[in-house]
Image (tube, grey):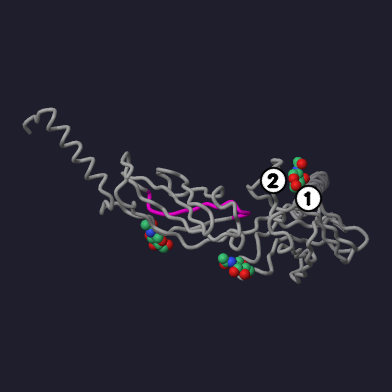
Amino acid sequence: MPRAPAGARAVLLIALLCRLAAAGNPELPTAVNITWSSINFKTILKWQPKPSGYFYTVEIHGQMSDTKKKCVMTTETECDVTDALRNVKETYTAHVLSVKSLVEDNFEEPLFASSEKFTPYNQTIIGKPEIQHHTQKDSKLTVVFRDPLTPYMFPNGSFQSVRDIFKHDLEYKLYYWKDQSSGKKDATTKSHTFDISVDNKNNYCFYVQGTIPSRRENRNGQESTVLCTTVGRTILDEYGAEVFIIIAVVAIAVITLTIILAVILCKCKRAKNAREKEPLNGV
Ligand SMILES: *[C@@H]1O[C@H](CO)[C@@H](O)[C@H](O)[C@H]1NC(C)=O
Ligand SMILES: *[C@@H]1O[C@H](CO)[C@@H](O)[C@H](O)[C@H]1NC(C)=O
Ligand SMILES: *[C@@H]1O[C@H](CO)[C@@H](O)[C@H](O)[C@H]1NC(C)=O
């Protein structure tokens, strides 16, 4: 290729940049499969495909609030948009913009794809409650738990819990059952404590789950870990079946050994007796 003079090269470069800057780069892919995933008001927007040779920028459009940009020029395919959704009862739409490097595009709207609408208050999933302690005494099962926390803070810097936001729309359910049985019962509370009448001789297992009865979708939250009480524990519960199997195996081994030893000793004695009698027989 003949070397063009410097001036011509500069012109060529500018022409190239202009082409890049010309919006609506037809070859630039837009995001697909855009999904909201939100637990306890922590909300991540995800999409596809992985970009190559371009970037994404997320715009959050509310009904009332100003448009907010998040994850500007990212090469990721997800973006934490929690900050932009503080007004949790508002309904938001996300635009995922596909943008070329360097060139801030002033001529046309960049290409973008829109998400479905998302209302944090109606759609965020309630996370696992944390069981703080439990007791079973005198036919009473008591379970005390803590609300899941949200990423949002009070002005004094402490995190708001889901209850601070949902207030009386939020209830908790305790599901409980006799250990080793399948008949599940439930109880409901708007406080942090369950007091349930139970059969004192049995152990019970249980978990706690948040729920928002007024919701049509995502009504039930995530289940807490399952815990079991430990009244009336037998040695079998305490040590498990393995210990019993080991004891049984050892016992059988000892008995077998004893029998074998006895048989051998017996045979020896008989042989000895026989040998001692031999000379007499030989006479
Ligand atoms: C979008 O999701 C569909 C269904 O889950 C999948 O078949 C498709 O490959 C996804 N698109 C991209 C670009 O990954
Ligand atoms: C912060 O403020 C909230 C609500 O006003 C209150 O419930 C919480 O106890 C406060 N936390 C601290 C650490 O003072
Ligand atoms: C949120 O849920 C409430 C109660 O189900 C409903 O009245 C309201 O219309 C919902 N808002 C949106 C934006 O879906």
Residue that numbered label 1 is attached to: 132
Left or right: 92 with respect to 7? Answer: right
Residue that numbered label 2 is attached to: 154
Magenta residues, start to end:
39-50
**From this viewpoint, is residue 40 visible?**
yes
Residue at image location 28% in from the left, 53% down from the top: 24
- Residue found at the far left of this picture: 2
The disc labelled 2 sits on which kind of residue?
Phe
Label 1 CB, ligand 2: below 8 Å?
no
Residue nearer the viewer, 170 or 8: 8
Q: Quadrant of the N terminus?
A: top left
Residue 48 magenta-drawn? yes
Quadrant position of ligand 3:
bottom right
Label 2 CB, ligand 2: below 8 Å?
yes
Label 1 crowd bin: few (<14), some (14–19), many (20+), radius 10 Å: few
Percent x, y of residue 259: 79, 52
Spatial distance from mark 2 to mark 1, Cα to Cα? 23 Å
Residue at image location 70% in from the left, 51% down from the top: 161
The answer to which image quadrant residue 154 occupies is: top right
Residue at image location 48% in from the left, 51% down from the top: 67
Is residue 7 depicted above or below 148 in this figure?
A: above
* Total count of labels: 2
The disc labelled 1 sits on which kind of residue?
Gln
